[in-house]
Amino acid sequence: MISTSILSRGGRGIRFLPFHRHLIPASTTCSTTTLATLSSHPNPTSFKIATKNPAPFQNIVKSSSPVPGIVGFSMMASATAGEDGHFKLSETSVLKINKGDITKWFIDGSSDAIVNPANPRMLGGGGADGAIHRAAGPELKEACYKVPEVQPGIRCPTGEARITPGFKLPASHVIHTVGPIYDSDKDPKGSLRNAYKNCLTVAKENNINILRCIRVPL
């Protein structure tokens, strides 16, 4: 199983899960992945939230020390958990939090995608990014290399998203996004929101019905 713990202060990563206007600080010890089922709703950022085991939910996603500009999980606290562990927030789509190896996940191999926490060069790296590239095979790096640079050495700026085939991955596509570096980004909250929003937008534009991201890692 791939462990994707929160990056330390100053690192790059998507460290929070957005729920409408609320952001949830993810646990520093639990490795999780998220599953978002997109709907035909015109707003691609609307979704539900679910967990496999609703009782110990705070062991999966929990609040931590206050971070400037980040709101707590009051939206999650007000959600209603069903017997199947779904936290219903809206009628449009579903987001499920669970554990697992994201490189082995798929639904149908044709309309599903995983999200890769990439760097701006999109040529692979450490952690989940490196694991996804290794599992997909060298074809993924070749496809990423063909993505046009918008600036020298930058194929995917912070907060944006790009899509490639999944190649040897069981999921059909990989959506690459770049999270903010919190100590240097002028608006890390906005960049993080854009990363999630653009992943969902790219998925919808490419007829991706099921999207899985690391807590993202995300």
Image: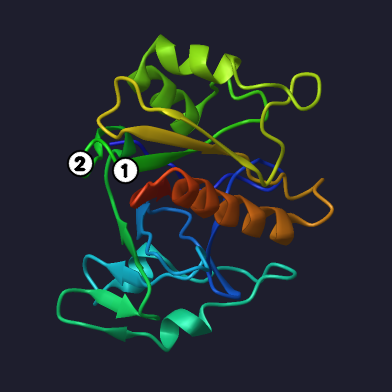
In which quadrant of the rendered view does residue 77 lie? Answer: bottom left
Q: Residues within 10 Å of mark 2 (few under 14, many from 20)?
A: few
* Residue at image coords 42%, 47%: 213
- The answer to whether 61 is drawn above or below residue 127 in the figure is below
In front here: 193 or 73? 193
- The answer to whether 146 is drawn above or below residue 23 in the figure is above
Q: How crowded is mark 1: few (under 14 residues within 10 Å), some or many (20 or more)?
A: many
The image position of residue 139, as x and y in percent, is 42, 12
The image position of residue 66, as x and y in percent, is 66, 71
Disc 2 versus disc 1: distance between alpha carbons? Answer: 7 Å
Secondary structure under tag 1 reads strand
Asked if the residue under mark 1 is in contact with the one under mark 2, i.e. CB atoms within 8 Å, the reply is: yes
Please give the count of numbered marks on the rendered protein: 2
* Residue at image coords 42%, 66%: 61
In front here: 5 or 90? 90
Specify the amino acid type for callout 2.
Asp
- The answer to whether 169 is drawn above or below residue 54 in the figure is above
Q: In this view, does 107 lie to the left or right of 129?
A: left
Q: Residue 108: which disc?
A: 2
Specify the amino acid type for callout 1.
Asp
* Residue at image coords 80%, 19%: 152
Q: Quadrant of the N terminus?
A: top left
Q: In this view, does 192 lie to the left or right of 171?
A: right
Q: Say which residue label 1 marks.
A: 112
Secondary structure under tag 2 reads loop
